[in-house]
């Protein structure tokens, strides 16, 4: 259960976006601990059109890895807005899990209560497994950079071709 209701969050965000009160005034008026919460509510509202979680999303390993790669050049809040992952602390949890357990730690967990017998535990990676996971991540990063450079070259070639015609 969250500290603030869906209706309250929506009211505060709409009041801020309408320009009735500044962010600092809203924090004081409604006795909210800090302005970070309101900023996160605003981002969530602007990206998804609502605030709150009616349905919890499950993200794939590859999606989580893409978000973590995006973090190398962007902040956590920017990544949350870009990929519509709210709250942004979810991304921090993914990063912590990745650092501790590697790529396999990012697998989506099954919903519901776990059976009491026969459950498998995720164990920290051996140094060889961690090195392999790091190499896979580096390979993925290099493939992405290569694709961006190819696209950039194609755009530059297209622009020079267009300029030659004129």
Image (cartoon, grey):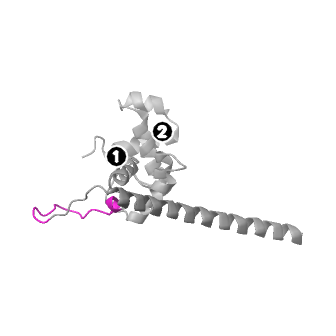
Tag of residue 153: none
* Quarter of the figure with residue 112: bottom left
Q: Earlier in the sequence, mark 1 or mark 2?
A: 1
What is the x, y in percent for residue 106?
Answer: 35, 60
Is 70 or 44 nearer to us in this picture?
Answer: 70
> Is residue 64 visible in the rendered structure shown here?
no
Residue at 25% of width from left, 59% of height from top?
A: 122
Residue at 76% of width from left, 65% of height from top?
A: 156
What is the x, y in percent for residue 101?
Answer: 32, 55
Magenta stretch, main secondary structure, is: loop
Specify the farthest residue to the front. 128
* Quarter of the figure with residue 129: bottom left
Tag of residue 7: 1
Give the quarter of the figure containing the C terminus: bottom right
Q: Which residues are magenta?
A: 104-118
Q: Quick check: is 165 in the magenta stretch?
A: no
Residue at 37% of width from left, 54% of height from top?
A: 98
Is 101 or 159 nearer to us in this picture?
Answer: 101
């Amino acid at each position: 259960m969250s500290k603030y209701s869906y209706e309250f969050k929506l009211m505060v965000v709409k009041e801020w976006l309408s320009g009735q009160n500044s962010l600092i005034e809203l924090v004081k008026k409604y006795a909210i601990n800090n302005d970070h919460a309101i900023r996160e509510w605003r981002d969530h509202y602007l990206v998804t059109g609502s605030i709150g979680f009616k349905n919890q999303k499950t993200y794939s390993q590859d999606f989580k890895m893409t978000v973590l790669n995006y973090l190398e050049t962007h902040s956590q809040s920017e990544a949350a807005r870009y990929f519509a992952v709210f709250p942004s602390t979810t991304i921090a949890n993914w990063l912590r899990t990745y650092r501790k357990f590697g790529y396999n730690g990012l697998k989506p967990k099954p919903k519901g209560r776990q059976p009491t017998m026969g459950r498998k535990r995720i164990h920290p990676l051996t140094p060889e497994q961690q090195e392999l996971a790091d190499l896979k991540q580096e390979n993925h990063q290099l493939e992405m950079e290569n694709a961006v450079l190819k696209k950039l070259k194609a755009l530059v070639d297209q622009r020079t071709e267009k300029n030659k015609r004129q």
